[in-house]
Image (spheres, coloured by chain):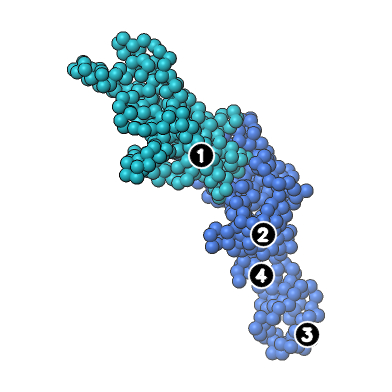
Chain colours: A blue, B cyan
Amino acid sequence: MPVLTIDNLSKKYGPVQALKNVSFTVPKGCVFGILGPNGSGKTTLLGTIMDVLKPTSGSYLLFDEMPTENQRKGIGTLLETPNFYHYLSGEDNLQISAAIKGRGKEDIPRVLEMVNLTQRKDSKFNTYSLGMKQRLAIASCLLGNPEVLVFDEPTNGLDPVGIAEIRELMKRLHQEGKTIIMASHLLDEVEKVCTHVAILKKGELIASGDVNAILVNEDLIEISAGDMVKLKEVTAKLKEVTTIKQDGNMLQLFYPAGRADMGEVNKFCFENGIVLTHLLLKKKSLEAKFFELTNN
Amino acid sequence: MLNLLQIEWMKVKGYKAFWIFTILYFFAIVGINYTGFYINELTVQSMPASTFLLGTPYGFPKVWQTVGWMSSWLLYFPGILFIMLLTNEFNFKTHRQNIIDGWSRTQFISVKFVFAILFSVVATLFNFLVALLFGFLTTGSVFHFEGMENIGYIFIQTLAYISFAMFLAVIFRRSGVAIAVFFLFGLIFEYLITVLINYKLNLSPVGYFLPLQVTDVMLPIPFGNKVIYKDSPAVYILVIASLIYIGAYYFFSLKKFKTEDL
């Protein structure tokens, strides 16, 4: 049973189209990353499925049912910023969240401990640092040990140790069988923790699916020779090459990560009567892949 | 609803401004009525004949109306308080978080209005006690149930002011704008429009049916009101109009909150 099914969702803010006919499905038990640059519609998408924004058109299902407020009670959500009553302590704020979710106070010490806020639980929220506010928001998500968690930029404002802790926490939650939906503009964050990914660009879904299929890591060898036609013929016989593209007077040979062997290519061409005038190995980074996916 | 109210109370009880506003408001009710009571005593002492004009405003049975009318000047206090309670949510984005955590949009707005009803009940009870106190303090006055319908009017008027204020908060979302509009409309523009409608356009009593004005006419100044509010409609019509307004504030606040992006 899918946790979330999004069907042709569109959202306009006046002339700005924040989401354009987005459809995808989040299966149970996965860590689903929604990846995209700033302003690509990630928060709009999550805000819509949490009913704080109204879609212009399209619909969505939670747990294969029409969404209601009671379903939201079973989903721990951090949307955009930590939203708490500034004049109340961290603990009092969690009591309000727990009460709205229909859960008792018993769980509050546990979640405070999980995000290392036990010592500051009696301090007012407006005395917290940015990182502590973010931790409190994550603690609030964990209240009642929900089966589904939605995190919008969960590592915002955290220091490197905090970031590592949150990633560890997400991996642990994933191992416990929870479903996590996470929006992020940080590619390596998605790569490190997600099993599935959807990539948004200017409100359009440009790819979605298994993270290894979408964010595949590739090696790239660039070669050139006097006789490009013959070079093309010959390289077509090379083993392990996944794709060959011509870029001006260069050929680009794509290999699965770590499988490109320059010596082998050089030798193969020479044995087939071609002298290479250019031979270069390019490790194609995920960043480059991301730019390729999100830029024109 | 009880559960929702408990949560609302958790939000409010830790909010210092709520207690400061409420306590000041209650002190001010006693204060403004004591001032009226004292001035009336002085006037009667120096000019015994004035009782023919003024009557005994702080004696039974007139005291219910007098206290209600005097206290009504202070209704901007709870109005501002409730504007702040709502705009705080918008500022902290906790209105979003409440929805995200599992309230429906209807629940969010409804519990605020129910809380306003409870606050109005408490304020009305306090007015009742103050009226009782000054009634007994007035020499020669004997407790009388007559005129006690005014206690009901106090409740309706308090709720009307507060729900009007909340409506403005939902419309404008910012405390500064909502408070400014509340004051300017309530203290200046509404009177202006009433006068224009009733006297310039000769459409009296239409001008008495403006949102806050209608409650002011329902609970009028205890002496000379026949001059000030001449040809005002029957009280029961004003009561019905006030209740319709309260319902409309709730309905339109809910409508806006339910259909909009938060």
Task: Identify which amino acid the numbered label 4 is placed on.
Answer: Lys
Quarter the N terminus of chain B occupies? top right
Q: Residues within 10 Å of mark 3 (few under 14, many from 20)?
A: few
Q: In front: mark 2 or mark 4?
A: 2
Task: Identify which amino acid the numbered label 1 is placed on.
Answer: Ala
Q: Are marks 1 and 4 on the same chain?
A: no
Which residue is label 3 attached to? A233
Q: Can residue B198 be seen in the rendering of this structure?
A: yes
Which structural element holds mark 1? helix
Report, in whole angstroms, how far the alpha carbon at label 2 lies from the one at label 3: 41 Å
Which residue is label 4 attached to? A283
Question: Residue at 56% of width from left, 36% of height from top?
Answer: B110
Chain bearing mark 4 = A
Report, in whole angstroms, how far the alpha carbon at label 4 lies from the one at label 3: 24 Å
Task: Identify which amino acid the numbered label 2 is placed on.
Answer: Val
Which residue is label 2 attached to? A22
**Nearer-N-terminus badge (2/3):** 2
Q: Residues within 10 Å of mark 1 (few under 14, many from 20)?
A: some
**Nearer-N-terminus badge (4/3):** 3
Report, in whole angstroms, how far the alpha carbon at label 3 lies from the one at label 1: 79 Å
